Amino acid sequence: MATLFDTRRYLSNFDAARTGHVFTDVLVIGSGVAGARAALEAAHYADVTLISKRTMEDTTTRWAQGGVAAVTAEVDSPARHREDTLGVGCGLNHPAAVELTVREGPTEIQRLLDWGLRFDESADGFALTREGGHKMPRVLHAYGDATGRALTDTLVRKLRAEPRIRGFEDCFVIDLLTTDEGCVGAVTYHEKYGHQLVWAKTTILAGGGCGRLYRETTNPELATGDAVAMAYRAGTRLRDLEMIQFHPTTLYIAGSSRALISEAVRGEGAWLVDRNGQRFMTAFHPDGELAPRDVVSRAIAITLAQTQATSVFLDVRHIPKKDFVKRFPYITESCAEFGIDVSRDLIPVRPAAHYMIGGIVTDLGARTTVPRLYACGECTSTGLHGANRLASNSLLEGLVFGRIAGETAGRAAAAQPAPAGPTALHSATPPSPKTRLDLADVGLSLRSLMWRNVGIERHGDRLQETVEIIEFWTRFVLDKVFDTPEGWEVQNMLTVGRLIAGSALRREESRGAHFRSDYPGTNDQAPPQHMDLRRSSDGPVFEPTAVGSAS
Ligand SMILES: Cc1cc2nc3c(=O)[nH]c(=O)nc-3n(C[C@H](O)[C@H](O)[C@H](O)COP(=O)(O)OP(=O)(O)OC[C@H]3O[C@@H](n4cnc5c(N)ncnc54)[C@H](O)[C@@H]3O)c2cc1C
């Protein structure tokens, strides 16, 4: 049945004849690792406008702790990195995307070094950590657990120094503009300039993930799924949205904002224990604490139910304090703020939504299914992660596919004429006669619903109920024309929530990050399939697609 999700093309009203216009060669939406890397590459070929909804530095990338996975050690090889990535991907990886990423990884690391980023070193070279799913130490980090901050500082310094890149900060992209030519730019809102139409020869979408759809999440407030929602409205193909990765260990103390306790802590030898002090992971997986994230998250959920506890604990007391503090200064400080001395006390943890594995379908050139539109970073489904992301592979993906998106879109912009430009484009949704809304309450209700029904363990009945509830809420949220980012974010979150729940409902098996208690096994009777979807006027059309078929 058609809902406002399916009939409403633009969230805001505008008229090209009356709105301010900006013209650029390449428009990049997002300043995280993917958007920044894309902009820096595109600037070799064309003029670039980079838009971020907050400051350029304020991204999910900035919060990354563990590091970047890449082959730098002599004993390691791209083949081993590829095997580990495929090993956790549960049959949904695209081998070509995996191969490309692991092979280009070392070049991207060298480029960061050339740009001044200093990764931590040991006596034998880089100080490498082994994280869950990696068969050997491979993860580079900087300032201990402040890798994201170091990476962001390096990239943003480059962005601000590049004369061909113009940054628009605190500027909200409401929607992608589309015509018969494909994507021709975006509709934006800035407190000072109001609505503007940014016309671009090519557009790169790098808007990040959607962790804020869940009550328990490691993601910062900006991760509201805007990129996926606007791509859906613009008609791109989306894939495997049901694959949400839950991070097993976030600090579970009221008021701690679910601070992440990096996987690297377990990589450095931490144990997971239950409320009775018993280690439990060895009963669930031969790799114990270093099992893939979905296995650890589910093991914790089961242990919590068995022990009737609200958290399990990380035990790092056997790791020399000076080593732990040096390696994890941020985590040590976060714990200390709540009176936890990591050398004496257990650290209470439980899982939280962490990473959007699926997203906008892109090919090896970062092209989406809409002409002139490219995408990279967490908002995409490149085929690298399959059904489960290998730890620390997402910063790597952002670097590799960011570079590719920048090159493909930059070259295309240099070679093709500008879009037809200010046309008769307009959007006019009549004012809604319905009641005013408590937007914050809608957001909170959605987060609780998603955590309860579309979290670590799912069931068909509850997924069906979730779709129905969200569609009901749509009737009085999607009919409104908001004039602030808070309203557009809630509309985007409802859109993405409905698509995640719908995809999870249709995948009638358990695979990777997606666990269905009514279908606890993986369907081995048929070749693995992606859950693709696209928009139609009758609602999302779900199209299971063979892995490896053309995007
Ligand atoms: C706590 C934490 C720790 C992590 N640790 C690691 C790690 O150690 N290693 C690893 O590989 N991965 C890690 N990850 C995952 C990784 O950080 C992210 O997947 C990655 O940084 C995403 O990068 P991105 O460029 O795609 O998006 P982001 O960094 O999220 O950037 C998104 C950009 O899009 C902009 N944007 C979004 N919507 C709009 C809009 N409507 N209008 C305008 N601009 C918009 C934002 O302003 C921002 O600039 C971690 C994630 C978290 C939350």
Image (tube, rainbow, N blue to C red):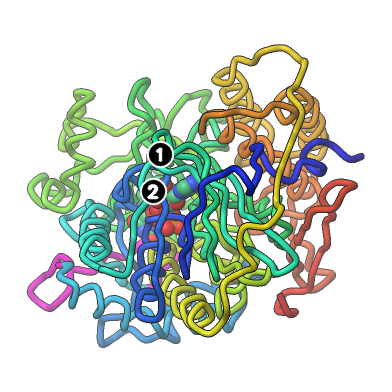
Q: Residue sitting at 75 percent across and 66 percent down?
A: 180
- Residue 166 magenta: no
Between 185 and 464, the residue placed more toward the observer is 185
Between 277 and 43, the residue placed more toward the observer is 43
For the stretch drawn in magenta, the main secondary structure is: loop
Q: Secondary structure at mark 2?
A: loop
Name the quadrant of the N terminus.
Answer: top right
Q: Position of residue 538 (x, y in %)?
A: 90, 47
Between 139 and 169, the residue placed more toward the observer is 169
Is residue 112 visible to us here?
Answer: yes
Residue extending furthest toward the front = 17
Between 213 and 523, the residue placed more toward the observer is 213
- Residue 131 magenta: yes
Q: Is mark 1 within 8 Å of ligand 1?
A: yes
Are dots 2 and 1 in contact, CB under 8 Å? yes
Q: Position of residue 262 (x, y in %)?
A: 33, 49
- Chain part drawn in magenta: 118-135
Amino acid tagged 1: Pro
Q: Residue sitting at 14 percent across and 77 percent down?
A: 125
The residue wearing badge 2 is 60
Classify residue 201 as left or right of residue 504: left
Classify residue 354 as left or right of residue 265: right
Classify residue 304 as left or right of residue 112: right
Classify residue 537 as left or right of residue 466: right
The answer to which quarter of the image holds residue 58 is top left
| Earlier sequence position, callout 2 versus callout 1 | 2
Q: Is mark 2 within 8 Å of ligand 1?
A: yes
